[in-house]
Image (cartoon, grey):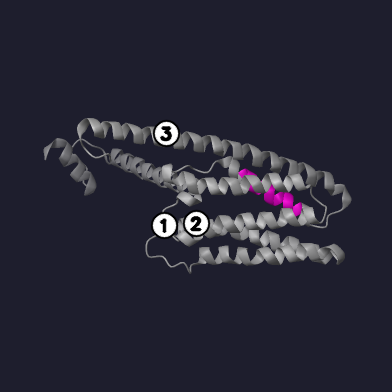
């Protein structure tokens, strides 16, 4: 076994080798524990930052789970919210508060369904498709509804929805070339959009309108910037994937072995 093997065996059995202080063993074990904890945190952070489309599907998990149930609830809330928003035009302000509450509940479900799916291993193909559809449908209903009520410029609605739909479709295309983690800017963009829309939907006093406009302007700017950043990353990823595939084919042609 050798000296090194004997020391490792003694450490594993809790027996300090000759000449080694118990304090040294405790320090070494503490370092190993910290290293394992850091690895777990890093893996969890990668999972949280991963593109939802790129997350592996859990084997043997039913589509009827809590994560998908929250996504389904959000989809159901979309037409309810849209109706409340449009119907509030000639009704008491309580209708606008109801529409705002419905929107906030839907946004909260968006936060928790993805978290539950990642942490509890409930990722399914149905959820990976339904979740982005629910997100875009909710934001689309809010922006279109506000524009129909002449409370939001149509160009804002067009720019935001074009970016959201375009990037969602691009994700499904890029995934076969590799995994692209979601940037922090994307999360900030989503939060800013939700906050701006919530303020627009709520029947706030007139002096709050400049605040609403500033937040919406920030949301639009973040939407465009993060969209452009995502396109650049996608182009680099596809280009790198194709270059790697070309090198493998060239190597296979030289060696006579099939490309891996």
Residue 231 location, quadrant: top right
Report how far apart the C-alphas of labels 2 and 3 lie in the structure: 25 Å
To which residue does mark 1 refer? 57
3 vs 1, front mark: 3
Q: Spot the residue most to the left.
A: 1
Question: Percent position (x, y) of residue 104?
Answer: 68, 59
Q: Disc 3 or 1, which lies upstream in sequence?
A: 1
**Element at badge 3?**
helix
Would you say residue 17 is visible in this rendering? no
Q: Is residue 70 above or below residue 163?
A: below
For the residues bearing labels 3 and 1, Cβ distance under 8 angstroms: no
Residue drawn at (68%, 65%) of the image:
79
Does the stretch in magenta take in 191? yes
To which residue does mark 2 refer? 128
Tell me where the magenta segment starts and ends, as one range.
Answer: 188-199
Residue drawn at (20%, 42%) of the image:
8
To which residue does mark 3 refer? 240
For the residues bearing labels 1 and 2, Cβ distance under 8 angstroms: yes
Q: Is residue 205 left or right of residue 198?
A: right
Residue drawn at (27%, 39%) of the image:
259
Of residue 146 and residue 14, the one placed in the foreground of this image is 146
């Amino acid at each position: 076994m050798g000296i090194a093997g004997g020391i490792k065996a003694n450490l594993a059995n809790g027996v300090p080798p000759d000449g080694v202080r118990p304090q040294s063993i405790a320090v070494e074990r503490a370092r190993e524990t910290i290293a394992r904890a850091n690895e777990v945190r890093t893996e969890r952070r990668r999972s949280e930052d991963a593109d939802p489309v790129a997350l592996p599907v859990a084997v043997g998990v039913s589509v009827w789970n809590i994560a998908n149930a929250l996504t389904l609830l959000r989809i159901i809330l979309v037409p309810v919210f849209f109706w409340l928003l449009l119907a509030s035009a000639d009704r008491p302000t309580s209708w606008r508060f109801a529409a705002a509450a419905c929107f906030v509940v839907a946004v909260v479900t968006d936060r928790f369904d993805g978290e539950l799916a990642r942490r509890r291993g409930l990722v399914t193909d149905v959820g990976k498709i339904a979740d982005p559809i629910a997100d875009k449908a909710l934001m689309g209903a809010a922006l279109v509804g506000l524009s129909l009520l002449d409370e939001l410029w149509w160009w804002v609605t067009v720019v935001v929805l074009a970016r959201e739909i375009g990037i969602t479709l691009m994700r499904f295309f890029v995934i076969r070339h590799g995994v692209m983690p979601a940037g922090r800017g994307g999360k900030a963009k989503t939060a800013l959009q939700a906050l701006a829309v919530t303020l627009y939907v709520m029947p706030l006093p007139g002096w709050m309108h400049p605040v609403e406009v500033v937040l919406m302007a920030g949301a639009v700017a973040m939407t465009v910037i993060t969209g452009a950043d995502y396109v650049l990353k996608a182009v680099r990823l596809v280009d790198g994937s194709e270059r790697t595939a070309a090198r493998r084919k060239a190597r296979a042609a030289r060696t006579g072995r099939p490309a891996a």
